[in-house]
Image (tube, rainbow, N blue to C red):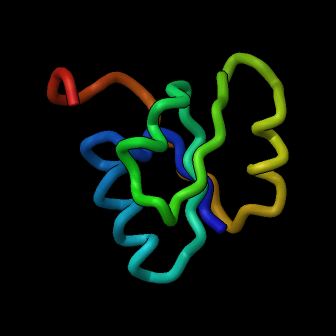
């Protein structure tokens, strides 16, 4: 299982698609709960706030990797 923040961005979206194609289980941590409407059904989405410890920590526990791609947008609105 791979956990990804920023999985709907310019870099994150194609990376998530590649991980799914390689048969990884992917979980996105997202600040936006509506993100599950724009990402593949094969991806699970958990709401998170990086500044606050919460239920999202259980998603990270036992993951093979955590990829942090969250940050400012590179090319304006996406």
Which x, y percent locates residue 52?
Answer: 76, 19
Q: Nearer the viewer, residue 34 or 50?
A: 34
> Quarter of the image containing the C terminus?
top left
Quadrant of residue 20 within the rendered picture: bottom left
Quadrant of residue 19 within the rendered picture: bottom left
Give the side of residue 3 with respect to residue 51, left or right: left
Up the image or down, 61 lies above or below 68; here it is below
Task: Please tell me which residue is depicted at 69% across the width and 67% down the height of the picture.
Answer: 64
> Quarter of the image containing the N terminus?
bottom right
* Residue, far bottom: 22
Task: Please tell me which residue is depicted at 66% across the width and 22% down the height of the picture.
Answer: 49
Up the image or down, 35 lies above or below 15; here it is above
Number of marks: 0
Give the side of residue 9 with respect to residue 24, left or right: left
Which x, y percent locates residue 15?
Answer: 36, 60
* Residue, far left: 75
Give the side of residue 17 with respect to residue 31, left or right: left
Which x, y percent locates residue 47?
Answer: 64, 32
Q: Nearer the viewer, residue 70 or 34?
A: 34
Up the image or down, 42 lies above or below 12; here it is below
Give the side of residue 28 with respect to residue 64, left or right: left
* Residue, far top: 51
Task: Please tell me which residue is depicted at 55% across the width and 26% down the height of the picture.
Answer: 31
Task: Please tell me which residue is depicted at 59% across the width and 54% down the height of the picture.
Answer: 44
């Amino acid at each position: 299982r791979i956990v990804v923040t920023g999985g709907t961005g310019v870099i994150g979206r194609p990376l998530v698609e590649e991980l799914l194609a390689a048969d990884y289980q992917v979980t996105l941590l997202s600040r936006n709960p509506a993100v599950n409407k724009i990402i593949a059904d094969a991806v699970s989405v958990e709401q998170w706030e990086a500044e606050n410890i919460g239920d999202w920590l259980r998603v990270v526990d036992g993951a093979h990797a955590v990829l942090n791609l969250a940050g400012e947008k590179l090319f304006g609105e996406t």
